[in-house]
Image (tube, rainbow, N blue to C red):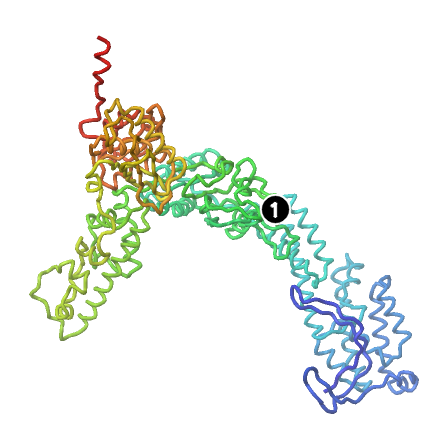
Amino acid sequence: RIGTAALAVQVVGSNWPKPHYTLLVTGLCRFQILQLLKEKPYPVAEVEQLDRLEQFTNGHKTEEELGELSEQFYKYAVQLVEMLDMSVPAVAKLRRLLDNLPREALPDILTSIIRTTNQEKLQILDAVRLEERFKMTIPLLVRQIEGLKLLQKTRKSKQDDDKRVVAIRPNRRISHGSITEDEEEEEDHDDVVMLEKKIRTSSMSEQALKVCLKEIKRLKKMPQSMPEYALTRNYLELMVELPWNKSTKDRLEIRAARIVLDNDHYAMEKLKKRVLEYLAVRQLKNNLKGPILCFVGPPGVGKTSVGRSIAKTLGREFHRIALGGVCDQSDIRGHRRTYVGSMPGRIINGLKTVGVNNPVFLLDEVDKLAKSLQGDPAAALLEVLDPEQNHSFTDHYLNVAFDLSQVLFIATANTTATIPPALLDRMEVIQVPGYTQEEKIEIAHRHLIPKQLELHGLTPQQIQIPQVTTLGIITRYTREAGVRALDRKLGAICRAVAVKVAEGQHKEAKPDRAEVGEGEDCKEHVTEDAKPESISDTADLALPPEMPILIDFHALKDILGPPMYDMEVSERLNQPGVAIGLAWTPLGGEIMFVEASRMDGEGQLTLTGQLGDVMKESAHLAISWLRSNAKRYQLTNASGSFDLLDNTDIHLHFPAGAVTKDGPSAGVTIVTCLASLFSGRLVCSDVAMTGEITLRGLVLPVGGIKDKVLAAHRAGLKRIIIPQRNEKDLEEIAAHVRQDLTFVLAGCLDEVLNAAFDGGFAVKARLGHLNSKL
């Protein structure tokens, strides 16, 4: 209950980044608490002064009473000060204080200067009697003197520096919890020293080392209360953690890499070939720059997962950066350190996370970048994805160059239409088409079904899904280029089977029902396994399911419901004016119906189905070509006139009106549809077509042939009409798909019409012109 009265002289500090205050006070006297009056909002007490400063003036009497004790203390104090460097102003001032101040004040002053613990300081403050205070302070002085002697003995080569290193605080600064703050300052000082050591021993570039050493000098002179202290320290710690020269060693065994890729992914021959080529070149040249690949294909075909497999094949670290919806260039290049809350970009953060400078970076959904007021992130990627520039990539936060040339960048996209041309030019585009039905069956039985069985706690001894059933799921319950919907359907089947297996185990656990059902067949019907509501209550309680549960088409209908997609091609082509086209979408290829009808009117052409401008122009081209060749093909309107729009309105409709459609590849389909309408003949139900037309009747090449062909193959079509100049694209299609289809290569619309109708679409001989020549 003894305290010290003092006057507050100065308060310095701030609340950011953490509360830190320094209080400068002047001590007056000791006091003792007699009675505590109140505690809130701050303590107030009645006190009694224990030592009076006026007594210090009567120094002779006190000195005589203390005698030898005071002289001994003064001797040790002078010895301690003389061991220090007298050229330091603070030490010289302390020497003058020893001669000028009364001896009674010296214990308090020296105790606050020499290195002591918090507990020892409190003991000196609690000592009210001068004799007791002298006796307690002398051992502290002796200890300090012995420490100085030992220090001078062990470090003779740096004697001048040692005299300055002594823990003497010339300014008497007292604050709440002062010893704890001193310890924190010492720890921070040690951390800064360690940080400087890490910077000097790191393998960063010369430019980065120069910047870091400059920043560490600023950090040493900077008080912790400054907001910039934490920012500078975070910056230096990031610079130390970055992998400037740390890398992993590539596994270059091509045969082992081929095995890993084949085990992880079925098909995808182009991707595997490109990775093996990279490995082969790396064997011949060690400092090969990392390629910048762009996998373009519909969702669900494994673009992201194959990037992870490439990293595993090479033995490199893998990091995925999702770019979908990113609209700020600072996400790529980082923020400048002048801003509050600044941080490096995703590229530098990813390198810090993986800890090596040659990882595999997957830039996911690069086609879904957006622009905003904060800049264009696609433009910021130009430097990252340029092999000629990324060896000196400069992040705004680092403000020094970092080498990205050893990073293997893999970008994924659903379409190249939304990627800026400058960015697309820097990447090596590899098309990843959708899977065929045969490939989906293999993927399901190699990867998807084992994965779903493991997720649902089932074993192959409990459930069997034949390939015929898998084909039924693919054709009747999914319509996609990838396998995500197929994976979900297989998961639904496994959940239904898990219910039956759990119920069966529960029934077998009952002893009174253990022998029920011995006379039944050895295999239970699939419908009984998969459809609990189709089984009577008595049978359901009595008979556990026989293992394994076989899934057939009846079970599919019970579990997944009625088929979502039907083979509707044949029934849709039962009247003139309908043709089947092929369209490309980011989700893969699709078949597209074109319907036409005519009625009396004023010669107008109506187009519906949410069409784009290019497709509308294709429709006008088609009607113009047919009108100019109507006599040649003997095409007439309802009144028998060769002018097809004479008193006749034509309506063209493209079903699925909620889906936006555009592009020139529907030109041949529109011509065929209108030719069927005006001739009254049916288009073959197993024929699909694609191609751009001109006013002269030529058929020009189009893109997406492989996806379109796969869509026709999934729909069960047998003949496909494509432009003659697209013949080279057929080499990308699997051999078994080409065997199932018949391709008609058309160079003009005459060949298209001849292939689209049974018996051809022959040109009628115009006898009137022949007779006139005779």
Q: Residue at x 78, y 68 (%)?
A: 168
Whether 753 is drawn above or below 216: the answer is: above
Whether 357 is drawn above or below 28: the answer is: above
Left or right of residue 617, residue 183 in this image? right
Nearest the viewer among 187 and 466 is 466
Residue under label 1 = 204
Left or right of residue 304, residue 1 in this image? right
Q: Residue at x 32, y 34 (%)?
A: 602
Residue extending furthest toward the bottom? 35
Nearest the viewer among 126 and 134 is 126
Q: Residue at x 77, y 77 (%)?
A: 139
Whether 619 is drawn above or below 160: the answer is: above
Q: Quadrant of residue 280?
A: top left
Nearest the viewer among 495 and 133 is 495
Residue 682, image x and y in percent?
20, 34
Residue 264, image x and y in percent?
34, 46
Left or right of residue 88, residue 419 in this image? left
Q: Is residue 316 visible?
A: yes
Classify mark 1: helix, strand or loop: loop
Q: Quadrant of residue 76?
A: bottom right
Classify the position of the C terminus by image quarter: top left
